[in-house]
């Protein structure tokens, strides 16, 4: 199992289109991947699950991956968050 | 993959699919919107629905999502109900369309797909302040 901390740094937070991008990225990997705040953790392969995090700009999140490709999965997701989901905002 | 027809009066069906497509273009695969004009007569609505169902049919059954139980769109759809072939779920919403992609990929039979989707739609209706209250430090 591998865990990495990230922060939401785009203005709109983890909104629906951003969540869809996370799901697409997560589904590329076999590992189970979870995204969590301090209070709860959800499946990173579910758009509706991710939306319930209500993660706004500045929210710290942990990405937890468990499986054969966990390292690559974490790396890809961290890059997506750092890239502000490709929104540049 | 079981095809889905979103059926409403006005432009609601089309816009629900548009909204889902904006979130992720994959969400609307194998889905069709049928927006019935407000002044359409029921025979014409029925004819359009029949044509749409024929176009979507791939032999696995078709799921019709309507706006409201008791509404005209639902009433037009009900005569087409046919176990294993055509199922109708009423009161559809955007989270259901979002959920649809992942549930459909499970390859469930039509009735189970309808039930799972209904449960997801009901669960998606939240009082935001109650959801967010959990986060507040006590």
Image (cartoon, coloured by chain):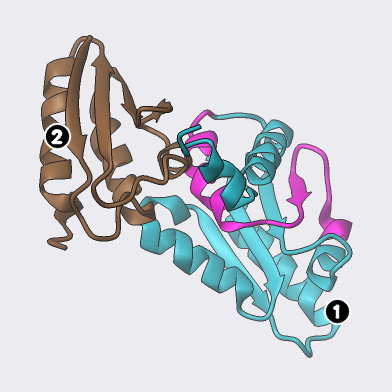
| Residue A68 visible in the shown view | yes
Q: Disc 2 and disc 1: Cα gap in Å?
A: 55 Å
Q: Could you say where residue B65 lies in the image, as x and y percent from the top left?
A: 69, 56
The structure residue drawn at horizontal position 76% and vertical position 46%, both measured from the top left corner, is: B87
Which secondary structure, mark 2? helix
The residue segment tinted magenta is: B77-106
Query: Is residue B80 shown left or right of residue A33?
Result: right
Q: Chain of mark 1?
A: B
Is residue B24 among the parts visible in the rendering?
A: no
Tell me residue B5's x, y (percent): 63, 58
Element type at mark 1: helix
Is residue B78 placed above or below B44 in the rendered structure?
Answer: above
**Residue B6 screen position, x and y as percent:** 63, 62
Q: Nearer the viewer, residue A35 or B25?
A: A35
Corner quadrant of residue A53 = top left
Q: Is residue B91 magenta?
A: yes
Picture coordinates of residue A37 (x, y %)? 35, 31
Residue bearing mark 1 = B43
Residue in view at x 82 percent, y 39 percent = B83
User: How many residues crowd mark 1 within 10 Å: few (<14), some (14–19), many (20+)?
Assistant: few
* B120 shown above or below B12: above
Q: Residue A78: give its label.
A: 2
Which chain is indicated by disc 2?
A
Badge 2, how many Cα within 10 Å: few under 14, some, many 20+?
some
Q: Residue furthest bottom?
A: B39
**Toward which corner of the image does residue B122 lie, by quadrant?**
top right
Chain coloured cyan here: B
Q: Colour of chain A?
A: brown
Between label 2 and label 1, give the one nearer the viewer. Answer: 2
């Amino acid at each position: 199992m591998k865990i990495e901390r990230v922060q939401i740094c785009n203005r709109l937070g983890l909104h629906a289109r951003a969540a869809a991008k996370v799901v697409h990225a997560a589904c590329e990997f076999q590992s189970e991947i979870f995204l969590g705040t301090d209070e709860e953790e959800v499946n990173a392969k579910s758009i509706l699950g991710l939306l319930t995090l209500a993660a706004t700009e500045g929210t710290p999140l942990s990405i937890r991956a468990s499986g054969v490709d966990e390292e690559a999965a974490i790396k890809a997701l961290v890059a997506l968050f750092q890239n502000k989901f490709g929104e540049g905002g | 993959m079981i095809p889905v027809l979103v059926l409403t009066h006005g432009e609601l069906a089309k816009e629900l699919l548009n909204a889902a497509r904006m979130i992720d273009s994959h969400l609307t695969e194998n889905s069709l919107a049928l927006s019935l004009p407000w002044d359409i007569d029921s025979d014409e609505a029925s004819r359009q629905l029949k044509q749409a169902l024929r176009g979507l049919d791939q032999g696995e059954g078709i799921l019709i999502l309507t706006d409201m139980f008791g509404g005209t769109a639902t009433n037009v759809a009900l005569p087409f109900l046919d176990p294993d072939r055509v199922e109708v779920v009423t009161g559809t919403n955007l989270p259901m369309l979002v959920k649809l992609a992942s549930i459909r990929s499970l390859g469930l039979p039509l009735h189970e797909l309808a039930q799972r989707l209904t449960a997801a739609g009901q669960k998606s209706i939240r009082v935001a302040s109650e959801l967010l209250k959990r986060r507040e430090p006590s």
